[in-house]
Amino acid sequence: LGDQGLMALAEALKFNQSVRLLDIRENGVTDEGMITLASTLKVNSTLCDLNLWGNKIDDTGAIALANVLETNQTLLNLEIASNQISRKGKSILKETWMFTRKGRTLRI
């Protein structure tokens, strides 16, 4: 899939009314793709489960996602382990998740 494929998918998800789970593990997604997906999550109101395991996302992508979590209330389960996120990036993502999603699943 990679970043280009994710960007196309993210565009479609802006108008999505039915997709609740997106599993894009091990697809070579980098910060570029993650930033585009994060932008989509600002307006998407149906996606509940997102699996980004084993991509190439680092702190920039993690922080973009953390910023979106403050407004997106539909995402309930996030798997983002086995990426290139530092301790600091994980901490920012975890703090935002815990503040906005108490009792929901986060795997970093």
Image (cartoon, rainbow, N blue to C red):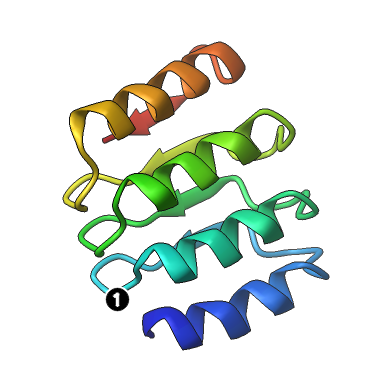
Viewer-side residue, 53 vs 4: 4
The residue under label 1 is: 27
Secondary element at image label 1: loop
Residue 26 location (% of width, % of height): 23, 70
* Residue 77, above or below 13: above
Residue 91 location (% of width, % of height): 32, 22
Packing grade of label 1 (10 A; few <14, some 14-19, many >=20) is some
Viewer-side residue, 19 vs 39: 39
Circle count: 1
Residue at coordinates 72% horizontally, 78% vertically from top-left? Answer: 12
Residue 37 location (% of width, % of height): 58, 62
Residue at coordinates 38% horizontally, 85% vertically from top-left? Answer: 1
Image check: 39 left or right of 21?
A: right
* Residue 29, above or below 88: below
Identity, as a three-letter code, of the amino acid under mark 1: Asn
Q: In the picture, residue 105 is in which quadrant?
A: top left
Residue 35 location (% of width, % of height): 54, 60
* Residue 105, above or below 52: above
Residue at coordinates 63% horizontally, 72% vertically from top-left? Answer: 10
Image check: 32 left or right of 7?
A: left
Q: Quadrant of the C terminus?
A: top left
Viewer-side residue, 49 vs 89: 89
Residue at coordinates 37% horizontally, 30% vertically from top-left? Answer: 106
* Residue 15, above or below 7: above
